[in-house]
Amino acid sequence: MNYRRVLGLPLLVACSILPVYADIQPVAGTAAGTFTNPTGGSTVDANKWTYDGQAGFVTFNGVSFSGSTPGSFDFGSIVLTNQGTRPEGTFGATLNLHLDFTNPDGQSVDFEDGLQIVAQSGGGNSGHGDQLWLNFQGYPDPQSFTVGSEIYAVTYDGFFDSDHNPVTDLFVENNPGGTATAHLWGTITSVDPPAVAPVPEPGSAVLLLTVAAGCIMGVRRKRARA
């Protein structure tokens, strides 16, 4: 008698009742961005980066985010506004991203000095277009934090539209007063440390051994009768 075949069904049933562990964790929070390190005579004020004294040349509008990990999240939009006729010039600044989590509560992530960008006034297809270079010096390294045994990591995806379709790293707004928008997306993952095979609870182990022993005894009795 093939004991493996006899024991196969009870083992399959026993394994099917063991707990199943999912690696999906919900996250929620808010994102905010600030500009620093202006160059070329430009100035910054929190989420606004300006030139020639005109507010709103480039702004970052952070948003709330929520969903399950692993997943991609929209952290906000960067908006380029064409302010009309201005002296031509090239300007640089740094976008710093800050994430506050409400789930897991009390956690935060900072990408300080994380994204160097360059803007140019004047030029463009119509002679007065404004241009914005994104991903000027590459995206910053991932950031992570640990809650209990769970490790959360946040990485930059880059700039996309609101539906996560890619946009060019250089976009131009040629119309005075017009705006061009790109959304900053990132990926959040949550992973457990290397898993150790779970030890069955005492009750489950006893049940499994009892079923297996019963099957073996039944086979032996059948062979003895034969």
Image (tube, rainbow, N blue to C red):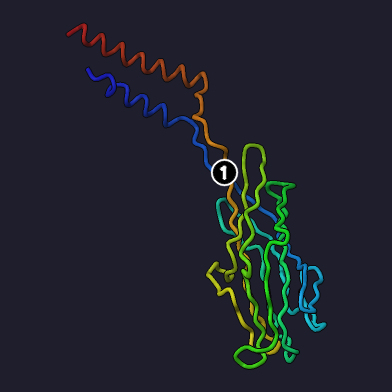
Q: Which residue is mark 1?
A: 191
Left or right of 183: which side holds 226?
left
Left or right of 223: which side holds 158?
right
**Residue 94: quarter of image:** bottom right
For the point 64% across and 93% down, which residue is it?
Answer: 127
Q: In x, y percent, where is residue 4?
A: 29, 22
For the point 73% across and 86% down, which residue is it?
Answer: 83
Q: Amino acid at mark 1?
A: Val
Q: How many numbered badges does the structure rendering display?
A: 1
Q: Is residue 222 above or below residue 37?
A: above
Secondary structure beneath dot 1 equals: strand
Q: In x, y percent, where is residue 59?
A: 73, 73
For the point 59% across and 46% down, which residue is it?
Answer: 190
Q: In x, y percent, where is residue 175?
A: 65, 89
**Residue 41: quarter of image:** bottom right
Left or right of 17: which side holds 174?
right
- Which part of the image, by quadrant, shows the N terminus? top left
Q: In x, y percent, where is residue 11?
A: 37, 25
Residue furthest to the top in view is 224
Task: From the viewer's side, name the closer residue of 170 and 207.
Answer: 170
Task: From the viewer's side, name the closer residue of 194 and 198.
Answer: 194
